[in-house]
Amino acid sequence: MKKLCVILAIVMAFSGLIAQNVKLGYVNTDRILFDSNEMAEISRLFQLDRQKWTGQIQALDNEIQQMERDFDVRKLTLSENSKRELQDQIISKKEEAGRLLQQYFGDNGLAEQRYRELVDPLSQKIHEIITDIAEDEKYTMILDVSMGVVLYAVPSIDITEQVLQELNKDTIRPTDFDHDFPSFPDSKDPFDSDPFGDDFKSDMDMKF
């Protein structure tokens, strides 16, 4: 329904431009992100931070599991007071792990802040490149085919490669990049295999 509304809005815009000299172009922001040297570096840097944060949480989880195993082994020989004391220590350690998980991967946590810190300058840069090309070459409108609202367009009006060349001209792709497309996770689960999630692409789309 949302895409239909966007299509209708574009059709209405075109109807008002029929009598004018219209020059249209399109860009594929999915491909720009996938082939961007800077996005590859962003993914590499975020993975390093994520591994560090995940390692700290995993270390706490291992400590909790060891405490629980020790308690199970010793509980038959412990007094009630000693049992409660050890159980309180385990609960306290679990609460510490929960706070750390929230601090790193919760809403507006360090992972999300780091993601914005890395991504926002790139999204702004891509937007400025597209705007400069549109203004320099007198485009009336630039559409994003990755949003799924363009059903057909001739390749001659595709400026994706032009944007990529400008974006990558002064950068080098990291050699250890695995080419996984990055996006920030809705679940923010530090043990999820994907370091980002679908929110990233949605955020980028809103900027174009």
Image: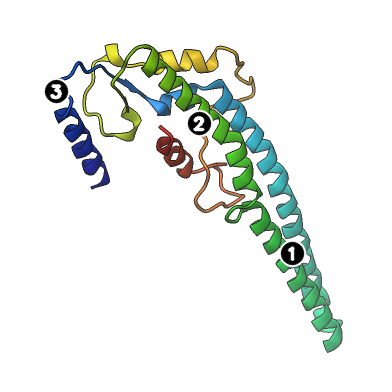
Residues at marks 1 and 3, CA–CA distance in whole angstroms: 63 Å
Local packing at callout 1 (Cα closer than 10 Å; few below 14, some 14-19, many 20+) is some
Q: Residue at x 69, y 62 (%)?
A: 99
Q: Residue at x 76, y 67 (%)?
A: 93
Name the residue that disc number 3 marks: 18
Front residue of 188 and 74: 188
> Mark 3 or mark 2: which comes first in sequence?
3
Q: Amino acid under label 1?
A: Glu
Name the residue that disc number 1 marks: 96
Q: Amino acid under label 2?
A: Ser
Q: Residue at x 41, y 22 (%)?
A: 131
Residues at marks 3 and 2, CA–CA distance in whole angstroms: 32 Å
Residue 74 in the image, given as x and y percentages of width and height = 83, 76
> Mark 1 or mark 2: which comes first in sequence?
1
Query: Do callouts 1 and 2 mark residues in contact (Cβ within 8 Å)?
Result: no
* Residue 178 visible in the picture: no
Q: Residue at x 59, y 32 (%)?
A: 43
Local packing at callout 3 (Cα closer than 10 Å; few below 14, some 14-19, many 20+) is few
Name the residue that disc number 2 marks: 123
> Mark 1 or mark 3: which comes first in sequence?
3
Residue 96 in the image, given as x and y percentages of width and height = 74, 64
Asked if residue 188 lies left or right of residue 45, the reply is left
Residues at marks 1 and 2, CA–CA distance in whole angstroms: 36 Å
Asked if residue 177 lies left or right of residue 164, the reply is right
Q: Amino acid under label 3?
A: Ile
Circle 1 sits in a helix, a strand or a loop, which is it? helix
Establish if 123 lies above or below 191: above
Residue 9 in the image, given as x and y percentages of width and height = 22, 38
Mark 3 vs mark 2, foreground winner is 3
Front residue of 46 and 24: 24
Query: Do callouts 1 and 3 mark residues in contact (Cβ within 8 Å)?
Result: no
